[in-house]
Image: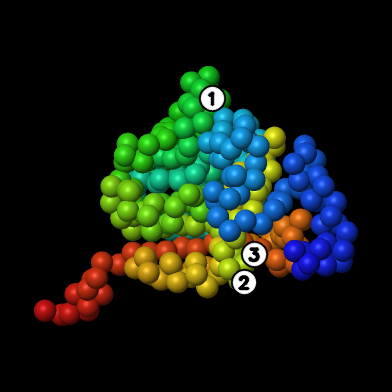
Amino acid sequence: MRRVIKHLLQTPSAVSARLRQNTSRAARFSGVYPSRDAALASLPESARSGYDNADIADVSFEWMCQRAAWDYPLLYWLQNIAVEKVTVLDAGGHLGTKYIAFSDIWDMQHIHWTVYDTPGIIAAAKARQAAGDLPEPIRFHDDLGEVPACEILLASGLVQYLDQSLSTFLMQLKQRPKHILLNKVPLRDGKDLFTVERIGTARVPYHIRSRQTWEAELANLGYEIVDRWEIAGLSHRISTHPWQGQTDSAGYYLRWSEPGAAAHESDPH
């Protein structure tokens, strides 16, 4: 406690952020917690739905449908690996915003684009699509058991909201995707921690992973890390706890190779 008080005295802005933490003027990120459950427990009971909240669906929708600088590595690799008829699983894909953002500069007629998200988000997406406000080709699901097998898994801004590890999520898919594109992964030097993110009027737990632990998890998946990029524009600090250091953001392209495939291909016999 003395350490916290010392930090607060040295950072007046953190005091202000803490005073506003449970108000409508809360900072985007506030609080530090050891687990997702602890972050949820810090919220009023009425605000504990997490990301499964239809009210979140419309927040920044138009902005999310526009391409940002950090989208271009995704677009580059999608255009290189999705050259034939394929299924893309856009996990945590919201209202299909990545499909919308890419479709005006990329012919996606050969892509079966499937979005998986929480029931609240998917309900809002289906209502918008039925009203003609979302592209008809997008398929929306809130049950992984109903999601078709995919060759490409796209997860842009997903892992910080998952209530499970990436490896556990992959085990629930009907088949192992050959390609995985991850974007906007929050990482820090130090231990894993959780904070609370304000999205409109909603509050959601937000997982910031240890860089070392995360890289080890990726290595254990059995995928080759083909590419990795830093997203400097998404770096930030937790307003109430700036002494926890900077949170960075990264993206990855992972490619699966069947065990022994390389040796088989190089064997002239």
First in sequence: mark 2 or mark 3? 2
Disc 3 is placed on an element classified as strand
Measured along the vertical axis of the image, is residue 176 above or below residue 102?
Answer: below
- The residue pinned by badge 3 equals 248
Position of the C terminus, as image quadrant, is: bottom left
How would you rate the neighbour count of disc 1 (Cα within 10 Å): few for under 14, some for 14-19, many for 20 or more? some
Outermost residue on the left side: it is 269
Position of the N terminus, as image quadrant, is: bottom right
Q: Residue at x 62, y 56 (%)?
A: 33
Given the image, on which type of amino acid does mark 1 rest? Answer: Arg
* Tag 2 and tag 3, C-beta contact below 8 Å: no
In percent of width and height, residue 223 lies at 37, 67
Residue 55 bears which disc, if any? none
How would you rate the neighbour count of disc 2 (Cα within 10 Å): few for under 14, some for 14-19, many for 20 or more? some
Tag in front: 1 or 2: 2
Q: Residue 250's image quarter?
A: bottom right
In percent of width and height, residue 151 lies at 34, 52
- The residue pinned by badge 1 equals 128
Q: Residue 230's image quarter?
A: bottom right
Q: Nearer the viewer, residue 38 or 98?
A: 38
- The residue pinned by badge 2 equals 189
First in sequence: mark 3 or mark 1? 1
Tag in front: 3 or 1: 3
- Distance CA(mark 2)–CA(mark 3): 9 Å
Given the image, on which type of amino acid does mark 2 rest? Answer: Asp
Q: Nearer the viewer, residue 30 or 224?
A: 30
* Tag 1 and tag 2, C-beta contact below 8 Å: no
**Residue 214 visible (yes or no):** yes
Image side of residue 165 versus residue 134, left or right: left
- Distance CA(mark 1)–CA(mark 2): 41 Å
Q: Residue at x 45, y 45 (%)?
A: 90
